[in-house]
Image (spheres, rainbow, N blue to C red):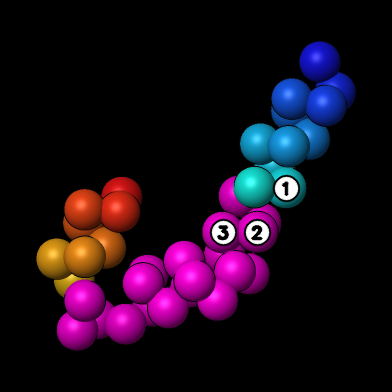
Amino acid sequence: RVRGGRQKYKRRLDTENNPYLGLTLPPPTKKPLTKIVS
């Protein structure tokens, strides 16, 4: 139970801190890409 919840929380932080996802979300020029990723 704690593992699953923790992973979900950590994944969310990783996605925001990750350079891979961070590069696809921050750039406004890739608006279509962000929509697909979302």
Gap in angstroms between the C-alphas marked 3 and 1? 8 Å
Residues in magenta, as a range: 12-30
Does label 3 or label 1 sit earlier along the sequence? 1
Residue 1 appears at what percent x and percent y? 81, 15
- Per the image, the residue denoted by label 1 is 10
Q: In the rendered view, would you say 22 is above or below 36?
A: below
Residue 18 shown left or right of residue 2 in the figure: left
Query: How many numbered circles are shown?
Result: 3
Disc assigned to residue 15: 3
In the image, what residue type sits under mark 2?
Asp
In the image, what residue type sits under mark 3?
Thr
Residue 11 appears at what percent x and percent y? 64, 47
The reply to whether the magenta stretch includes residue 27 is: yes
Question: Which is the main secondary structure of the residues drawn in magenta?
Answer: helix
Discs 1, 2 touching: Cβ within 8 Å:
yes
Residue 14 shown left or right of residue 33 in the figure: right
Discs 3, 2 touching: Cβ within 8 Å:
yes
Q: In the rendered view, would you say 26 is above or below 38?
A: below
Gap in angstroms between the C-alphas marked 1 and 2? 6 Å
Residue 20 appears at what percent x and percent y? 49, 71
Residue 36 shown left or right of residue 7 in the figure: left
Q: Residues within 10 Å of mark 2 (few under 14, many from 20)?
A: some
Which residue is outermost to the right?
2
Image-quadrant location for residue 29: bottom left
- Per the image, the residue denoted by label 2 is 14
Q: Residues within 10 Å of mark 3 (few under 14, many from 20)?
A: some
Q: Residue at x 42, y 78 (%)?
A: 23
The reply to whether the magenta stretch includes residue 2 is: no
Residue 36 shown left or right of residue 24 in the figure: left
Q: In the rendered view, would you say 5 is above or below 38?
A: above
Q: Secondary structure at mark 1?
A: helix
